[in-house]
Image (cartoon, rainbow, N blue to C red):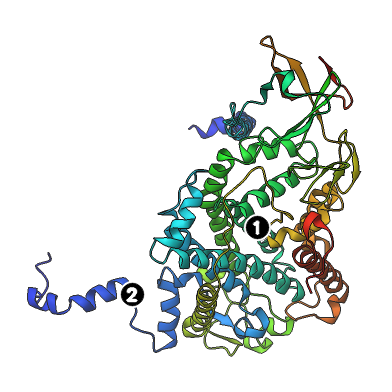
Amino acid sequence: MSTLTPEKPGVWSAVKELPGNVWSSIFRNPLPSTDLERSSTSFTNFFLHLHPVKVHKNTLRPIYTLGLGLMALFLFLILVVTGVLLMFYYVPSTTQAYDRMLDLRGTVAFGIFLRNMHRWSAHGMVAIVFLHMCRVFFTGAYKRPREFNWVIGVLLLLVTLFLSFTGYLLPWDQLAFWAITVGTSIAGYAPLVGQQMKFLLLGDTTVGQEALLRFYVLHVAVLPGVLVLLVAIHFWRIRKDGGLSRPEKAAKPPAQATYKARVYGLQGFVRGPFTKIGNVGDDSVYSWPNLLLAELFVFVLTVSAILVVSLLFNAPLEQPVNVMHPPNPAKAPWYFLGLQEMVSYSAFWGGIGIPGLMAALLLLVPYIDRGTKGVGLWFSRERLLANTIFLTLVILNVIFIVIGTFFRGPNWTFVSPF
Amino acid sequence: MNPANNDAQPVPRRRLLAWLSSVGLFGSAVLAAVSDLVFFKPRVTYSPSARFSIGKPDDFPPGTRVARDVERVCVVREGNRLAAISTTCTHLGCIVSISDTGFACPCHGSRYDQDGTVTGGPAPKPLPWFKVSLAPNGEIEIDKNSQVQPGNYFNL
């Protein structure tokens, strides 16, 4: 203690100021009321410093992003929370897994509700991640300098699908067992390494205890870890690539308002949108509260939707596994039914050839399409060809999924659902 | 370090060392990745043995055609000839059932004739035939690890 302090603060005053002192030691600012405090709030808070201090107005247009990326993130958060809770009651054993599903339904408090939330969020995440990809494509948002973030995004889609697929086996009911039997057999068609890959994945020649354990570990530890890492890179790159894409004319402030200057600060390392000194007029607004309110809105929307769906619909649970009686027809998860439909024509082309080609094409999209026009606009004229090709493939995929889901009956014969 | 030595030959030596250590590190990484694969490939599996006996030949009188769902084989006896045909669909691994014309798969509609030859549907290959033998104790033994040419019956 310094003896130079003119007045020694008394213990009583320390107690009186305790709440305020604790608060201000955690949050460096009061609730912001000035622009400086708004900047500082975003900058000094661990969770908020993911955000830029200011965002472009275009970023906040709901009609531009549709909030799909955020929805995917929030669905993932719901999945982590509900998934960890389910882990407290689940045992990855062929003799116990199904009973635990029944326990969730019968004895565990909120068990059925948690399982519903987990199942519907998982389906939702697959759908939303796919739609997010469509949004990014149709707005040309993958173009320079955001090429690599598109690649990360495609990897995120693949990891999401694999996460959902590994989770599918865990209830150990007929649906799970046969969907995974069919799904892993598709992997077995890959040239050269197919059978090896299948054996590594299943830990055995058929789906059994080893497969259940492997899928469990992949589902609760390995893949979520990979996903978190990729999401972190995805978000980091949004910042480093200059924020979300936007129309070219909106990308820069009026010319007379900028001037070159040396800036010694963190912002100097961040590419775009521009370096700004003083109070120059531009099209950006402070992240606090604008961006945060938008995020909160999407969060509430996502959670409410999942809560409502989970209250209304129960996650399916079929009969326990009977390895001798495949259900007829045996169907993969819905997002793989397009694959399964193609597989019913040719196992190699439907299961490996075409999907592999599609994945490779998706990864290469930003390196094939090098045009710089039409960024930041939905269905821009300049991107008519690219958008048409992509839309055609999306529609084809949806058609195959619809056929596989609704128009295929016993022995995979064509049936009418009407 | 003596600055005078820097003029002699320090750069090639440093570059060589850097190169060698890069190779070493990269090599270790590759080795680690390969060992992972070795680790993940089980040396033993816990599933039932691929070689098993199914009983005496008398249990299967001539004309028998019976599917054993647990072992996933169909035992066929014609006269004094025995065969074991796989009932795992070659398309995507579902279990085929015995039909009037041979075998039919419930999953994607593949159809096979009596010998397991594909007659319809997406199956890419015929149903494999497994090696049948007579064990010393007189029981029929089937080895799912070794296949024989379709039509290659075992003579009792």
Chain ID, mark 1 = A
The answer to which of A187 and A110 lies nearer the viewer is: A110
Q: Measured along the vertical axis of the image, is residue A348 above or below residue B52?
A: below
Q: Residue at x 53, y 80 (%)?
A: A301
Q: Residue at x 62, y 52 (%)?
A: A174
Q: How many marks?
A: 2
Please name the amino acid that badge 2 sits on.
Phe
Q: Which mark is residue A27?
A: 2
Q: Which mark is residue A361?
A: none
**Residue contact at pointers 1 and 2, CB within 8 angstroms:** no
Q: Measured along the vertical axis of the image, is residue A294 above or below residue A365?
A: below
- Determine the secondary structure under disc 2: loop
Q: Quadrant of the C terminus of chain A?
A: bottom right
Q: Position of residue B21 (x, y in %)?
A: 59, 31
Instruction: Answer yes or no: is residue B8 visible.
Output: yes
Q: Which mark is residue A161?
A: 1
Q: Is residue A205 left or right of residue A116?
A: right
Label 2 crowd (10 A; few <14 / some 14-19 / many >=20): some
Q: Position of residue A228 (x, y in %)?
A: 53, 58
Q: Is residue A347 left or right of residue A257?
A: right
The answer to which of B12 and A106 lies nearer the viewer is: A106
Q: Position of residue B56 (x, y in %)?
A: 70, 18
Chain ID, mark 2 = A
Q: Residue at x 60, y 88 (%)?
A: A282
Q: Quadrant of residue A26?
A: bottom left
The answer to which of B141 and A300 lies nearer the viewer is: B141
Q: Position of residue A31 (x, y in %)?
A: 36, 84
Q: Quadrant of residue B153?
A: top right
- Determine the secondary structure under disc 1: helix
Seen from this angle, which residue lies furthest right?
B119
Label 1 crowd (10 A; few <14 / some 14-19 / many >=20): many
